[in-house]
Amino acid sequence: MIIVALLATANAVQTLRKPIKTPRPPTWPPQNADPYAKWYASDAGPLGRLVDLACESAFRSSLAREAGGDDNTPGFEGIINLAQRLVAVEPRSAAATRIRARGVLRGLFPDWPPAPGAEQPGLLWWFTRLFARPFPEFSAKLNAKVTWAAGGWLMGPLELRDLEETPEVGDGINQLVYVKRCRFLEQSGCASVCVNACKFPTQDLFNGDMGVPMRIEPDYETLSCSFKFGLAPSIDDEVDALSTPCFSACPSGGALRAEHRQCPDVADTSLFLEQLTDEQRELVLDKIT
């Protein structure tokens, strides 16, 4: 069965692989980044500067726990250093990095009300059963609204928009959180940090822990990004993310992505399998059988 699965996945990789992408432009930030969307330390989101600072402090504490200790660098630069350290903790396993980064996000939610035997924090367990399952459209719109209101300090200026695609959940109105110029991506300058410490674990949190379909689509030419609530991740999108080449500005010179390189050759199916969740592996096999 393992051999059959590997052969089937190899065929899927061969079918779904994208053409090898050209290297990123040598300039950083990219020339197409919105010059009017840069976030400064003095800026504040819709909830105010005090709420932003509280969110930043909670995120940093959770990130430090997973990264093995805090960084002495103050401000947002310290958060970027911690994110790079998180990816470097287990540089040979992108899957392990995703688990750690998902743990950072889980750490932001209290384990209350307690949910005996649940893997995720209690608040997320109860949200799934009391809101996401009985009220999927409401849950998708609620999470989009909360992300827009509370995520500016991390990602920069945000806009709440309508989805252009037909969503799986909801009518698409106000279900797209558009990041004009991602602060996290710009300051990290690292594709591996973006993919393994943000995109994949954030999707895992919403889709897996909260039961809310959500897909993240970054645009590395403009530093913009789209959080699409009501749309689950697609296999083509996942493969495209794994094939993202390193940026010229990467502070590690590509060292952080020893196992997060361009979509692997057909012969190296073990790497591709490792970088997919169980649900994604099933989708790959279903796509070709």
Image (cartoon, rainbow, N blue to C red):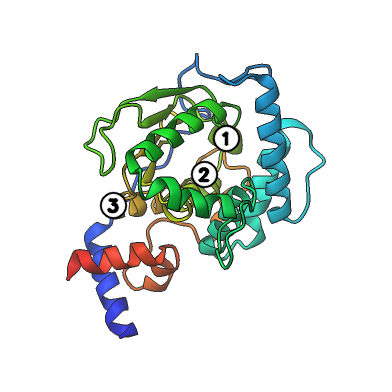
- Look at the numbered discs 2 and 1 and tell me whether their residues touch, using CB distance below 8 Å: yes
Q: Is residue 116 above or below residue 238?
A: below
Residue 187 lies left or right of residue 220; in this view the side is right
The amino acid beneath tag 1 is: Phe
- Give SS at disc 1: helix
Q: Which residue is mark 1?
A: 184
The percent coordinates of residue 238 (x first, y second) are 36, 53
Residue beneath the point at 61% across and 27% down: 153
Which corner quadrant of the image does residue 185 belong to? top right
Whole-angstrom CA distance, mark 2 to mark 1, is 8 Å
Residue furthest toward the left?
A: 289
- Look at the numbered discs 2 and 3 and tell me whether their residues touch, using CB distance below 8 Å: no
Residue 98 lies left or right of residue 133; in this view the side is right
Q: Which residue is mark 2?
A: 194
Residue furthest toward the top?
A: 36
Whole-angstrom CA distance, mark 2 to mark 3, is 18 Å
The percent coordinates of residue 43 (x first, y second) are 63, 17
The amino acid beneath tag 2 is: Cys
The amino acid beneath tag 3 is: Asp
Q: Which residue is mark 3?
A: 236
Residue 45 lies left or right of residue 137; in this view the side is right
The answer to whether residue 15 is seen in the rendering is yes
Q: What is the tally of numbered marks visible in this picture?
A: 3
Which corner quadrant of the image does residue 161 belong to? top left
Q: Nearer the viewer, residue 84 or 177?
A: 177
Residue beneath the point at 66% across and 40% down: 80
The percent coordinates of residue 288 (x first, y second) are 18, 67
Quick one: label 1, few (<14), some, or many (20+) residues within 10 Å? many
